[in-house]
Image (cartoon, coloured by chain):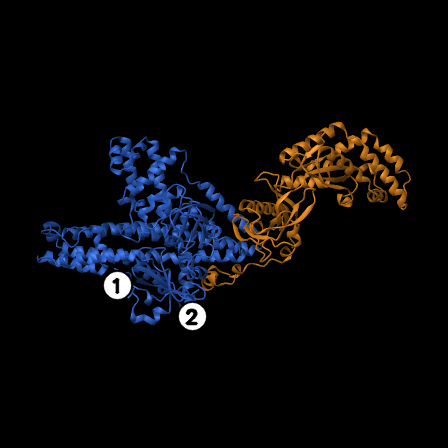
Amino acid sequence: MADRFPSPFDIPTPEGAEGWQDMYVYSSLFSEARHDYEDSLFWFQDGVHWPQVLTPWDATFFEFALASLSQYNTRHLQVPPANGIAFRILNGYGYLTPVPADPEQIEARVANFMDRAGFYFMNWDDLYDKWMVKIRGLVQELEAVNFDPLPEIEDADEVVKSGSGLGSGYRIQENYRTLIDLGLKLWNYHFEFLNLGYAAYLDFFGFCKTAFPNIPDLAIAKMVAGVEVDLFRPDEELKRLARLAVDSGVADAFASGDVDTTCQILKGSSAGEAWIASFQESAEPWFNFSTGSGFYHADKIWIENVEVPFGFISNYIGKLREGDDLARPMEAIRAERDRMVNEYSELLLTDEDREAFNGKLGLARVVFPYVENHNFYVEHWSHSVIWRKMRQLGEVFVKEGFWADANDIFYLKRTEVEDALWDYYVSWATPEPAAGPGRWPAIVKKRQDICAALAKWKPAPALGVPPEVITEPFTVMLWGITSESTKAWLGGGEGADGELRGMAASAGVVEGIARVILTPDQIGEMQQGEILVAPLTAPSWAPIFGKIQATVTDTGGMMSHAAIVCREYGLPAVTGTGFATATIKTGQRIRVDGSNGVVTLLD
Amino acid sequence: MTAVMWFEGYWDGMKAEVGGKAASLGEMTGAGLPVPPGFALTTTAFRASRDACDLDATLARLLYELDVNDMAMVSERCEAIRQEIRAMPIDPIAEQALRSAYEELGRRCNTVDVPVAVRSSATSEDSPDASFAGEHDTYLWVRGADNVVDAVRRCWASLFTDRATCYRVEMGYEHRSVEMSVVVQKMVRPIAAGVAFTLNPADGDRSTVAIDSAWGFGEGVVSGEITPDNYLVDKVLFEISKRKVSRKEVEFRLSDHDTVEKVELDDERGSAPSVTDAQLKSIARLARTAEKHYRCPQDIEWAVDADLLDGVNIVLLQARPETVWSKKVPTPSAGAAHGDMMSSIVSTLMNPLSSRST
């Protein structure tokens, strides 16, 4: 077995992807300027959030997220052992490496961390309330950003006579910069709490593992998990709408499976009209929900692709008619959580232990709602609005002949969009023909071809030299990268006897037929009773969880969004296998042991 | 007359009527600790039969001026009493109840002439049951109603073993004061058997049930002759957190003539897990129930019975207190030692679990 992964400098460019480096900012690339430094590190591909090729503009959130995370660890909170997470893009895929703190500085960092993080833990509820206000305010600001084509002449009253002195040409550029600034602000907010949430959780986790060395990870997660979680709300809204359709007698409208037909039928009755109104009420904000991780412009968003929620609602109507009440047994979930806590507490041997257990569990439960809920507000809701606004801007450029499709804008780097806006602005101000229409279509086409070539390349799970042990707590928890998983990757993933190993993310053992789903668009292909095998799963896939038996993913840890949702739906899940989508074929029989983190290929 | 008490019908008020052994089996059944199924023939049946044939007169005659130091005399007279009892007719109502109960047990076990253990369960107003422990007879692998009836009389007769009789004389107890109930209990025919601890013997983890298991009778597991399959099951979620299936070289199984024989195992059976996941969870639940019932960590013997239906085929053979870890003075876990929450969180971040030795 090799003792290291390939060097990032030895990875060849896939055929047809020559020049891919031009799609990204130079600082996000491996470069000769930092050759020795970069070559000495261990890099893993972040398939939890970015399993697909990043288009130039989509790299924005990759960069914003990792920079914000790093900034909080390093400059705000001074997490004692951990600095940030360095990030690079290679062949279109995101690679990460945790940066440890200088051991000599740790003592000083401890004091700062105790003060700063301590303040957050002490004032968590207040600060979280403020966070909610901030994030909702931010979404409002995002919604207020608009990109309209520049007018033939400015409005006399609004612009000229108002004395503002500023016109649409200035505003459109300002709005784009505002959108970018709000994006970065959003990611600053995202990490204001997240790592602290994980730290408190890990503390409880560590205590449980010390007191009960053999306690399943899952048991710990279940004791902490919330009962009512915003991340599940979109799915709850679908169920509510399905129930409403049945109760108000308009369920037959969904029989055709076609959105337009369904809407036409609904509009023909007052009950149908009422249903549509109710749908629209749910849709804002809950259907600002991505079918993917929320990090890609191409991920479908429910509110813009009504066929997606309609399809789920139609499925739920079917289940209701079969007698399933679709209700989450809240009382039973609460009672089970209490039972677990009582039993483990009883099994502790001393009162000191019980006190520590209760204290740590208490804090973990205070902080955990953030960990569970932020995903909806940031990756789904806010990102959905940003993608929408960007498409609006893309459309403005389409009218000006800069490119053919609104989505082509995502093949420009975020700084290039400013250049194009400048070009547009100048050509409007002068007026003269813009240079863009002669420049961008060819670039967009070339980059689309490159992305298509890169999409065929299967990213190596890791690069460089793995450390003896992986200790960075967030890396273990969020990405599921452990000393064991890197060893498994070095061995090629599959054990001698057709086994894949990963995280035991959600308990249970089932056997069944696998279906490999590589992109969110394919989820409609899942058949009743199959086992979902995917690079990762998104929370918005929840509605198909009633259909499938189990889930296997390439990436993700115990606390990845996929793991949280699988536990909620009681589906066996093995996450972070590294190679599931490459090893398992659709139609193959597999056994998923979510209690032990083992997937066995049966034929 | 209540001649028969099924284990599940036991309540505290019946102890005098069924004796210590039956009471304990009844109590365990009631506490959700599934011992092999069975019933007790009560002392009422014994009394009715005894009185009907005027056994007291026989006793008075044969025990008159018994010299406990004269071993020949003791032996002769006691044998005469035992013969009398072995020949004594059982009260007809009691005998009918016994035969019906035996037949019913066979139905419950899906077996005609189900093999049973017939055990004495003595009771006395004068002395604690322990004084009689091991003094009275037990008959194993008894099959067929006639043989059960006969074994019951033999158990009754064993009230007058030489030792028990001398003991009563020496202690000045009335012979009439001791009465005999008889336990009739299904013989276990194990598919698999083994032991379970309600903590992990390797690290003392109280959240875990450790289970050793092998094919057939548990002898090989208890003696160490077989390397058993080894499992850890969480006590709260009943998740199997560790499994190690071993190559089991031999199996102790029942021969055609009701003896235990040692059989070499081929590779396929020897390497196969000896219990299913569902059975493991049931064993763990059983062990946990025993621990809660007796309020201390337990070391139990269990078996998967071949004649009982899935879901009720895990039986408890023995439960005793665990003695190694239970004796240690508990000390708080490392994580509880940190005075305040922040120090603990810092310590967690500085020494993540993944770097700790396991």
Q: Do we see residue B208 in this rendering? A: no
Q: Residue furthest top?
A: B93
**Residue in the picture at 46% in, 60% down:** A484
Quick one: quadrant of the N terminus of chain A? bottom left
Numbered tag placed on residue B195 in the rendering: none
Question: What residue did someone put label 1 on?
Answer: A21
The letter of the blue chain is A
Question: What residue did someone put label 2 on?
Answer: A103
Q: Which chain is indicated by disc 1?
A: A
Image position, residue A601 (x, y; %): 44, 50
Callout 2: SS:
helix
Left or right of residue B69: residue A217: left
The letter of the orange chain is B
Q: Amino acid at mark 2?
A: Pro
Along the line of sight, the residue nearer the viewer: A338 or A26: A26
Image position, residue B151 (x, y; %): 75, 37
